[in-house]
Amino acid sequence: MNVNTPGRQLLFSTVRIDNVMTSGAVSMGTGFVMFVDLGGNRMCPLLVTNKHVVANAARLSAHFITRKPGTDEPALGEGAEVTLAPKAWLGHPNPAVDIAVVPLASVLEQCGEQLFMRALPLSLLATEDTNLYVDAIEEVTFIGYPDGRRDPKHLTPIVRRGITATPLDLDMGGDPAFLVDGSVFGGSSGSPVFLLNEGSYRGGDNALAIGTRIALVGIISATMVRHAQLPVEVANAEHVKIAQELNLGVAFNARAIKETIEAFVTSIGQKLQTAVDGVPVAVDPVTEASAPLT
């Protein structure tokens, strides 16, 4: 598989996270890899996900697709489970913001050459493009592992699309969040949410832009449900409580993602380099070389 288009590259930006909790329960979620610039040609690799995906872990692991030896190609169908330090993650300073980052430097030092990934640069965040135009209703793409599922043969994630149910530039309920009108299930938590337009897109109130637009606008956190009681014909039970999914997902926005990354970088005594507008790039996790996401 040639990983030579934006869509194909984004397929390899996510990993499935397995959490064996201290209670013995097992949960699955999604995370995505980002490289942030600390200056002086130093890149900090991070796994971005939700707090609830990594919380209360006795054992935490991430599932990557491996790299074909001696190439820059994925070995589709061949996976590697990498153990993560269960207590090493740091969350957004606001307890209500469900975003966490897990440092990946030690993982890549040990086995980076065996793993195939396309790390997302900080410049891909919507916060970093001052010229990014967003309308009240935008089509969004999110990538992850709903119900822990993936392509069982190739191990690639599941891609879904929807629209913004609340505007990206309005903090829903005062929180740095927005709603997605799309099918969001358990396991999708931690999925990156993108504006991904190829061919053309709206570049202004009355402007049509030609080309490709990619921006990381958020991270899936939860699905909205409605609890109700329905009558049933069962002896000694007149009603049963059910949870009805509303086909609405809660996502925290790009600003909240950046704030979490900034908090982590500060916690290790470093300073985040300010990204500049330009062509988004995907950073090679082994060589730190970069290639345009175009």
Image (tube, grey):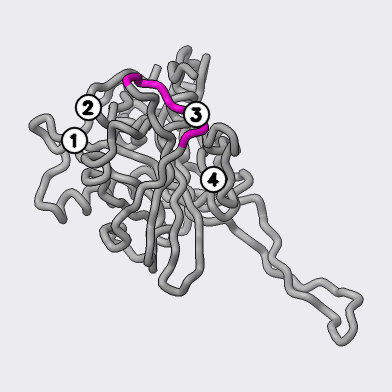
236 vs 215, left or right, is right
Distance from the alpha carbon under mark 2 to that under mark 3: 22 Å
Q: Say which of marks 3 and 1 sits in front.
A: 3
Point out the tag, 1 or 2, that comes first from the N-terminus: 1
Residue type pointed to by label 1 = Met
Residue 67 as seen in the image, left or right of residue 285: right
Tell me whether the residue at label 1 lies in contact with that at label 4, contact meaning CB atoms closer than 8 angstroms.
no
Which secondary structure, mark 4?
loop
Mark 3 closeness class: few <14, some 14–19, many ≥20 residues within 10 Å: some
Query: CA gap, disc 1 to disc 4?
Result: 27 Å
- Give the left or right position of residue 110, taking residue 198 as reference: left
Q: Earlier in the sequence, mark 3 or mark 4?
A: 3
Asked if residue 130 is positioned above or below residue 16 in the image, the reply reads: above
Q: Quadrant of the C terminus?
A: top left
- Where on the picture, by quarter, is residue 59? bottom left
Q: Which residues are magenta?
A: 70-78
Seen as rendered, the residue at the extreme bottom is 236
Earlier sequence position, callout 3 versus callout 1? 1
Q: Is residue 110 above or below residue 292?
A: below
* Disc 2: CA contacts within 10 A as few (<14), some (14-19) or many (>=20): some
**Badge 4 is on which residue?**
145
Foreground tag (3 vs 4): 3
Disc 1 to disc 2, C-alpha distance: 8 Å
User: Do residues under tags 2 and 4 come within 8 Å of each other at their CB atoms?
Assistant: no
Q: What residue does disc 2 label?
A: 288
Residue identified by numbered label 1: 43
Residue on which disc 3 sits: 76
Q: Which three-letter amino acid code belongs to the residue tagged 3?
A: Leu
Q: Position of residue 55 (x, y in %)?
A: 38, 64
Measuring 77% from the left and 73% from the top, which residue is drawn there? Answer: 229
Task: State the mark number for residue 65.
Answer: none
